Amino acid sequence: MHHKNSIESNIILMIDDNPTDVLLIKEAFALCDENCEVYVAEDGVYALEFLKQQGQYHHVPRPNIILLDLNMPRKSGLEVLKELKDDVDLRSIPVIIYTSSTTKEDVRSAYRSYANGYIKKSADFDGCIKIAKAIQYYWFSTSIFYEL
């Protein structure tokens, strides 16, 4: 079982190619949780290298959660999600889809591919703070999870 203590950092991997969205969510988490570190992978290919600790990502920590955009170059968010959930070493990491799309098809496809949550991106900083607080409260304060 995984329990947090006051020294451990909450590690988030944000997989997103939009620098504005990345900046907003990083700043929002910095305001909400001083023990939070947000790492960024600009696309799905880099994300999988990060998660498998390959190449330049050899010494990165394992994230506690993943924020995954659906619309990215080289490898879509759904492709990344499917690869993550097919990998016995990675499938236990909670994946929250964090995207601008709210189409029924995207939401349905994400949950059918075992996403743990689906959040629509906020266009403003106050909305990002609310999202960061909700994620921090649920995933880092309330939820208990097992590391496989």
Image: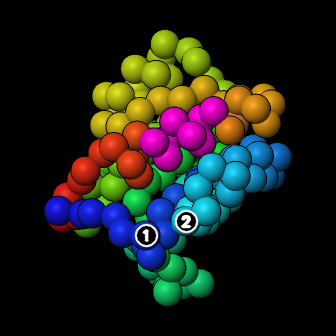
Q: Residue 44 in the image: x percent, y percent? A: 56, 55
Picture layout, residue 71 above or below residue 92: above
Query: Within 10 Å of the Cα at label 1, are there few (<14), some (14-19), or many (20+) other Cα atoms?
Result: few
11 within the magenta span: no
- Say which amino acid is labelled 1: Ser
Instruction: Identify the residue shown where x is 70% and y is 47%.
Output: 28
Given contact means CB atoms under 8 Å apart, are the residues at marks 2 and 1 in contact?
yes
Q: Secondary structure at mark 1?
A: loop
Q: Please name the residue that numbered disc 2 is placed on.
A: 35
Q: Front-most of 127 and 79?
A: 127
Rendered image quadrant of residue 99: top right
First along the sequence among labels 2 and 1: 1
Q: CA distance from mark 2 to mark 1?
A: 8 Å
Circle 2: is it few (<14), some (14-19), or many (20+) Cα within 10 Å? few
> Which residue lies at the image location 45% right of the left edge and 42% below the top edge?
137
**What SS does tag 2 mark?**
loop
Give coordinates of residue 136: x percent, y percent.
49, 46
In screen coordinates, is 74 left or right of 110? right
Check disc 1 and report the residue beneath it.
6
Can residue 6 be seen in this snapshot? yes
Q: Residue furthest front?
A: 6
Q: Which mark is residue 123?
A: none
Q: Quadrant of the C terminus?
A: bottom left
**Point 43% across, 70% down: residue:** 6
In this view, which residue lies farthest toward the top?
104
Extent of the magenta region: 130-137
Residue 82 position in % (x across, y down)? 36, 45
Q: Residue at x 20, y 58 (%)?
A: 146
**Viewer-side residue, 79 vs 110:** 110
Identified by mark 2, the residue type is Asn
